[in-house]
Image (cartoon, rainbow, N blue to C red):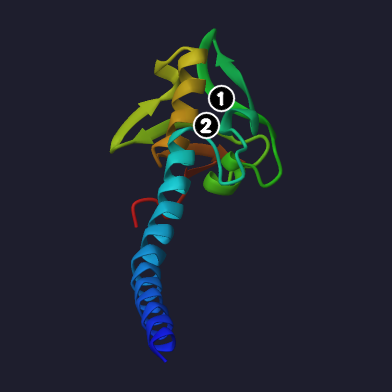
């Protein structure tokens, strides 16, 4: 009989420990997942590990020898740049808004403009684009 009480006591203690562990670990696991998503974005990747730089092809457009914009020549379907910003082929990126500061592409060189566009993905910035002659700020819901 003493063995039965001892085993029941051990099972109760084990059950209480398991209950306490599950209550504290579920929030930690959820928070960890959010942190992984944010870390991937900071690294310039989406949740599947696709790099933002691999999901877009850009080419400069010049007017009178000066850089005017960066044209989107190619996009990976459902890639990071398309899914986050909603970019489309032939969009012309004319400015980058990062932390409230507007950086115009025309004031940069080609490599710096590409870098700033990719950085906008990492920092949740916005892009100002010309799409069929209409000026758009993407993503439209940033900061909300």
Q: Whole-percent x and y of residue 122?
A: 44, 36
Q: Specify the quadrant that holds the C terminus.
A: bottom left
Q: Secondary structure at mark 1?
A: strand
Residue found 54% across the figure and 10% down from its top: 64
Classify 66 as above or below 61: above
Q: Is residue 15 visible?
A: yes
* CB under 8 Å between discs 1 and 2: yes
Residue found 46% across the figure and 54% down from its top: 33
Using the image, tell me which numbered label, if any, was put on residue 93: 2
Classify 140 as above or below 124: below
Residue found 58% across the figure and 41% down from its top: 80
Q: Specify the quadrant that holds the N terminus.
A: bottom left
Between 23 and 69, the one nearer to me in the picture: 23
Q: Whole-percent x and y of residue 98?
A: 34, 35
Classify 2 as above or below 109: below
Between 52 and 138, the one nearer to me in the picture: 52
Residue 15 found in image quarter: bottom left
Q: Whole-percent x and y of residue 118?
A: 49, 29
Residue found 64% across the figure and 42% down from its top: 79
Classify 143 as above or below 1: above
Between 120 and 59, the one nearer to me in the picture: 120
Name, please, the residue furthest toward the left. Answer: 100
Q: Whole-percent x and y of residue 53?
A: 58, 28
Can you identify the residue that label 1 sits on? 70
Name, please, the residue furthest toward the top. Answer: 65
Name, please, the residue furthest toward the bottom. Answer: 1
Distance, label 1 to label 2, CA atoms, is 5 Å
Q: Secondary structure at mark 2?
A: strand
């Amino acid at each position: 009989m003493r063995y039965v009480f001892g085993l029941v006591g051990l099972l109760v203690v084990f059950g209480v420990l398991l209950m306490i562990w599950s209550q504290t670990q579920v929030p930690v696991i959820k928070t960890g997942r959010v942190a992984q998503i944010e870390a991937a974005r900071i690294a310039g990747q989406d949740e599947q590990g696709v790099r933002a730089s691999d999901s877009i092809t850009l080419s400069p457009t010049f007017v009178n020898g000066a850089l005017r914009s960066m044209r989107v020549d190619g996009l990976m379907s459902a890639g990071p740049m398309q899914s986050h910003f909603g970019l489309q082929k032939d969009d012309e990126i004319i400015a980058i808004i990062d932390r409230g500061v507007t950086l115009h592409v025309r004031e940069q060189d080609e490599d710096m403009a590409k870098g700033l566009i990719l950085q906008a993905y990492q920092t949740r910035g916005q892009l100002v684009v010309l799409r069929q002659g209409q000026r758009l700020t993407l993503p439209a819901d940033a900061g909300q």
